[in-house]
Image (cartoon, rainbow, N blue to C red):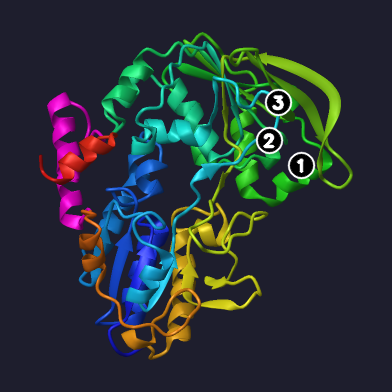
Amino acid sequence: MTGHLRVAVVGSGPAGLYTAEALLKQAGDGTRVDVFDRLPSPYGLVRYGVAPDHPSIKSIARYLQGVLERPGVRFFGCVELGRDVSRAELLERYDAVVYATGAMVDRHLDVPGEDLPGSFAATDFVNWYCGHPDAADHEFALDAEEVAVIGVGNVAVDVVRILSRTVDELRATDVPEQVLDALARSRVRRVHMIGRRGPAHAKFTTKELRELGTLAAASVHVRPEDMDLDAASAALAEDDRHVRGNIKVMAGWTDSPGGRPRRIDVRFWRAPVEILGSDRVEGLRVERTRLDGNGRVTGTGEFEDIPAGMVLRSVGYQSVPLAGLPFDERTKVVPNDGGRVLGPDGSPLPREYVAGWVKRGPTGVVGTNKSDAAETVRNLLADLGDRTDLDDRGGPDGGRAEPAGTIEELLEKRELPAVRYADWLHLDAAEIALARSLGRGERVKLARWDAMRAACRGT
């Protein structure tokens, strides 16, 4: 690639910043990458999805910070696609646009009672304790003694762990002060974690699972009959070291002693069929399940009511449509071929690409985004070749357009004060100073929009 390539990346989480890094590495000197995010803070799920009691994983932010500090990379926070700038306006100003917005909402259970007060998406709860500004005004009273968490993946384990930790265990983390106060008032004493399939099919990693057994004030229990493996599950465990590790950990919880203030019950082979209650959540009805001859989950007709004053569903994330872009409502991703956005007729749209979860769905770990971004960038560069002159840029239909002004001129015309990287560093410093003043850990997050914007201004 020759010339000065200019690319807009929408989304500043791992997918977006790994894309920026790949562009610098593969396209060479002279490459310019502008990274946009609707939030004033970068790093996406590394900041707002990784549990606060996992600081080692959050250290990935330091690596991503290095990308933002590379020559040729600029950050534009508080700029939202579809609200502040359009798809066409980005295409007019850049050689290519890469959308890396992640998966931002939860999947639904589609069972009666799901909309009762006290029934929440686990994503909302995660956003709340991670200090996401969209969740700053959410209220989780935590006044129920029993809570049901539906799901047996790592997000569900995170939620269960945060509900079961003591405030002293969380004081050194970066949870906002108002969240810590709410957790201090929590009346939760029992948490039920519920999975439709058996222990061999659970999605959590062994390390995350094992951590449940180390909590200072909570004991973990699994019913012995839930650990009975059918032939298919036994074969799966024999072939997969990860599954064997999970089963070994959980087998140790079948005779786990009680006596601690809180209790975690891991329940397998139970499918939610109804959230019970009239004015608010009072319980969860589940049906005992089994696998049929084709390996599909089927109900047995045996039901059980689990008392719970709050239900948190953790059955997966999904992306949402982006303004003007094609979207597959079945798979909940932007249709693409190796990152090339595909139009309604199945052909690639000129100069538009995707990376991360909006490209492949909510799969993999943080590091998966690196190879994913590299693939998208390889295809982007192969498509563009040497076409890096502004006169060839056009709108979403690929047509020719007159050269547009800069993105800064557009934002200034609309009186949109974007948060630049130097502004984010003011916010970063304010959170570190807040932690110091409160005698807590390395940082305490500011979670409200007004407080974050004020900190970005250095006020």
Mark 2 and 1 residues: CB-CB less than 8 Å, in contact? yes
Q: Which of labels 2 and 3 is toward the front?
A: 3
Q: Earlier in the sequence, mark 1 or mark 3?
A: 3
Going by the numbered disc 3, the residue's amino acid type is: Pro
Label 2 – label 3 distance at C-alpha: 26 Å
Determine if residue 430 is in view. Answer: yes
Q: Is residue 11 left or right of residue 254?
A: left
Q: Which residue is mark 2?
A: 199
Tag of residue 112: 3
Q: Which residues are magenta?
A: 419-445
Where does label 1 land, which residue?
A: 233
**119 relative to 38, above or below:** above
Of the 4 image quadrants, the one containing the N terminus is bottom left
Residue 101 numbered mark, or none: none
- Residue 295, picture quadrant: top right
**Taking the image as drawn, is residue 212 in sight?**
no
Q: Amino acid at mark 2?
A: Pro
Packing grade of label 3 (10 A; few <14, some 14-19, many >=20) is: few
Q: Is residue 128 above or below residue 385?
A: above
Check the picture and name the quadrant holding the C terminus.
Answer: top left
Q: Is 431 in the magenta?
A: yes
Residue situated furthest left in the rendering: 459
